[in-house]
Amino acid sequence: MIPFSPEVFFALFEEYNLAIWPAQIVAYVLGLLVLGLVFRPSVSGNRFIGAILAIFWLGNGIAYHWLYFMPINFAAPLFAVLFVIEALILWWRFIIRGDLTFRFHRDIAGAAGVTLMIFAMVIYPLLGMASGHNWPQAAMFGVAPSPMVIFTFGVLLLATPRVPIVPIVIPVMWALISGSAAWFLDIPEDVSLPLAGVVAVFVLVRKNRRAS
């Protein structure tokens, strides 16, 4: 049972968005930068992509879950911990180790990855607007968990030669958690989360088998 009403949830988002403004604009700039870098791969670019993903997860864990979501949801501290853990995993895998390349290829993984990235930045907010979730109550890219997780799926699918398994576990968990709450909170756009998770896992398995 969800311990808060849709009205309380969207009021929280309004307070959150107004408090962190203009972080939403910065998030979009970083997202566009990541999208550009996957078409022009480089060692420094790979680490920059990893750093941006880690910052997104860390920011959502601390700013959203811990500072704002916790007063209305007893599970928020657990979510905050999971998001910070994911940030550390991304930092270790893509910054410290740095042995993978983010690169667009003309294959299913490349098409799915870029599609999910664009979906998170453009289509998800448009679906929200169509559902009546306008600024400042909307879940904005980069600073809200749902579109950020879809974006993460997209980026991870572009990792070569193989998609790492560990960094995708927590995003899949969140896709199931948030997707299951979509109808209770009247957030139909969040139905895309578990669908994105299914696509990501399917493409991941297929790509890694081919790489083997």
Image (tube, grey):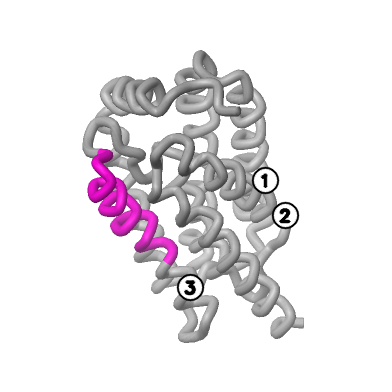
Q: Main secondary structure of the magenta part?
A: helix
Callout 3: helix, strand or loop? helix
Is residue 119 a member of the stretch shown in magenta? yes
**Of 45 and 102, which appears nearest the observer?**
102
Residue at label 2?
166
Q: Is residue 79 left or right of residue 113?
A: right
The dot on residue 209 is none
Per the image, label 1 sits on a secondary structure element best described as helix
Q: Which residue is mark 3?
A: 112
Total numbered labels placed on residues in the image: 3
Marks 3 and 1, how far apart at CA: 23 Å
Which residue sits furthest top?
A: 71
Label pair 2/1, CB-CB below 8 angstroms? yes
Q: Tell me the distance, in whole angstroms, between the alpha carbons under discs 2 and 1.
A: 8 Å
Q: Quadrant of the N terminus?
A: top right
Q: Nearer the viewer, mark 2 or mark 1?
A: 2
Q: Amino acid at mark 2?
A: Val
Q: Nearer the viewer, residue 78 or 50?
A: 78
Q: Nearer the viewer, mark 2 or mark 3?
A: 3
* Residue 101 in which image quadrant: bottom right
Query: What residue is at 34 percent from the left and 57 percent from the top?
Result: 33
